[in-house]
Image (cartoon, rainbow, N blue to C red):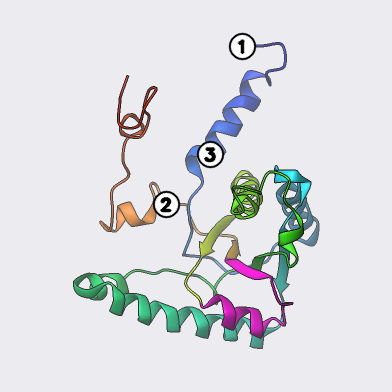
């Protein structure tokens, strides 16, 4: 423990938000107060950013026809994913994989255009722009959980089609459709675990010492 540590109850809250964050698919409608939405977006905007490039762009979807358009893109990709999964396709189709129509707020998060100009921290790892954007989404996710709101990250869509729908500039790329809002309850464990789709691996299998595959 250092002199810079938060008080015990605040540390507990941070770890609780991390442990209880869930990728939510079931929403209860309702609304997100404007002041709360701004607070969440400010938390996202405080994410670490390689070279301080701040590559994230947030598009708030307010028009019903745009929400329906996004729903159509997600459904089309859901069907293509089921086909690509082969024998697990029918099992996949039984999963609820998004809450686009049900959530209070719908956000699209995209990488900026003109990213090639930013080489600080990206010369050998250009994908660090995506890493920075992912940190912003995680900030938003944890802040939403602390505020009692659910959030789900939907990645089932054709990026080019979504970019066209939202009139995004050339070079930008949508990376996430975020469903945000009140929920009836949070899943006790990740939904894909609850549904028997996959099992989370224990930490000790994923931590090595000195070289790949060598456990302490």
Residue 32: image x %, image y %? Answer: 70, 62
Tell me the SS state at disc 2. Answer: loop
In the rendered image, the quadrant that contains the C terminus is top left
Q: Position of residue 85 (x, y in %)?
A: 27, 72
* Crowding at mark 3 (Cα within 10 Å: few <14, some 14-19, many 20+): some
Q: Return the residue nearer the eye: 204 or 14.
A: 204
- The numbered mark at residue 18 is 3
State the SS at label 1.
loop
- Across and down, in percent, residue 6 comes to 68, 21
Q: Answer left or right for 202 relative to 77.
A: left
Depth order, front residue of 29/17: 17
Q: Which residues are magenta?
A: 158-177
Q: CA distance from mark 2 to mark 3?
A: 14 Å
Query: Could one spot residue 189 in this view of the protein?
Result: yes
Residue at mark 2: 187
Left or right, 127 with reference to 206: right
Q: Earlier in the sequence, mark 1 or mark 3?
A: 1
Q: Is residue 49 visible?
A: no
Q: Which residue is mark 1?
A: 1
Q: Residues within 10 Å of mark 2 (few under 14, many from 20)?
A: some
Residue 47 sits above or below residue 105 on the image:
above
Count of numbered tags: 3
Q: Residue at x 37, y 56 (%)?
A: 191
How far is the residue under mark 1 from the one under mark 2?
Answer: 32 Å
């Amino acid at each position: 423990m250092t002199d810079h540590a938060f008080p015990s109850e605040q540390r507990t809250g941070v770890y609780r938000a991390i442990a209880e964050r869930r990728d939510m698919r079931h929403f209860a409608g309702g609304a997100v107060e404007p002041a709360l939405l701004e607070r969440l977006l400010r938390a996202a905007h405080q994410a670490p950013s390689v070279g301080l490039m701040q590559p994230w762009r947030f598009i708030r979807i307010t028009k019903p026809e745009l929400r329906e358009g996004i729903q159509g893109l997600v459904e089309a990709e859901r069907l293509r994913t089921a086909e690509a999964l082969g024998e697990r396709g029918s099992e996949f189709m039984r999963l609820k994989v998004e809450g686009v129509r049900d959530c209070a707020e719908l956000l699209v998060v995209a990488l900026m255009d003109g990213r090639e100009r930013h080489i600080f921290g990206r010369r050998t790892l250009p994908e660090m722009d995506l890493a920075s954007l992912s940190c912003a989404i995680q900030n938003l996710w944890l802040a939403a959980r602390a505020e009692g709101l659910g959030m789900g990250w939907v990645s089932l869509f054709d990026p080019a089609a979504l970019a066209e729908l939202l009139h995004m500039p050339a070079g930008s790329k949508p990376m996430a459709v975020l469903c945000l809002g009140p929920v009836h309850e949070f899943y006790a464990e990740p939904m894909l675990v609850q549904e028997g789709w996959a099992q989370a691996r224990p930490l000790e299998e994923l931590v090595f010492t000195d070289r790949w595959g060598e456990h302490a």
